[in-house]
């Protein structure tokens, strides 16, 4: 029985390899600073605001440190 068919997203996993590396965290910082377009990695923009805020940066860092929720 499938309880939830919605796949879990790995916050900050821009290259979709089921992990977040330092390169993706740095990319997120560049998005937050307005140096890159957040559309380049839509999975960082969890609230769909077309920008990356501090909470989304924290989520990406947490994922980098703790792993993706789908694989814990």
Image (tube, rainbow, N blue to C red):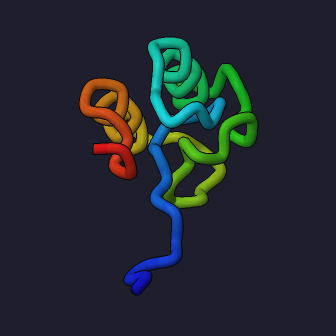
Report the residue at 32% width, 34% height from top.
67
Residue found at the very far front of the displayed protein: 1
Residue drawn at x 27%, y 44% is 72
**Front residue (pair 15, 27):** 15
Please provide percent x and percent y for residue 36. 70, 24
Q: Residue at x 58, y 31 (%)?
A: 17
Quarter of the figure that contains the N terminus: bottom left
Q: Is residue 38 left or right of residue 25?
A: right
Q: Is residue 9 above or below residue 36?
A: below
> Is 36 displayed left or right of 51 in the figure?
right
Where does residue 41 sit, x and y in percent of width and height? 67, 37
Q: Using residue 14 as the reference point, say whether residue 46 is left or right of it.
A: left
- Up the image or down, 4 lies above or below 39; here it is below
Q: Is residue 40 above or below residue 33?
A: below
Q: How many marks overall?
A: 0
Q: Is 60 situated left or right of 16 in this image?
A: left
Q: Residue at x 53, y 27 (%)?
A: 28
Residue 11 appears at what percent x and percent y?
45, 43
Q: Position of residue 37 (x, y in %)?
A: 73, 33
């Amino acid at each position: 029985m499938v309880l939830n068919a919605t796949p879990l997203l790995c916050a900050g996993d821009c290259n979709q390899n089921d992990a977040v590396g330092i390169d993706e965290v740095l990319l997120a910082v560049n998005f937050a600073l307005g140096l890159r377009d957040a559309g380049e990695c839509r999975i960082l923009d969890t609230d769909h605001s077309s920008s990356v805020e501090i909470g989304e940066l924290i989520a990406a860092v947490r994922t980098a440190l703790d792993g993706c929720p789908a694989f814990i």
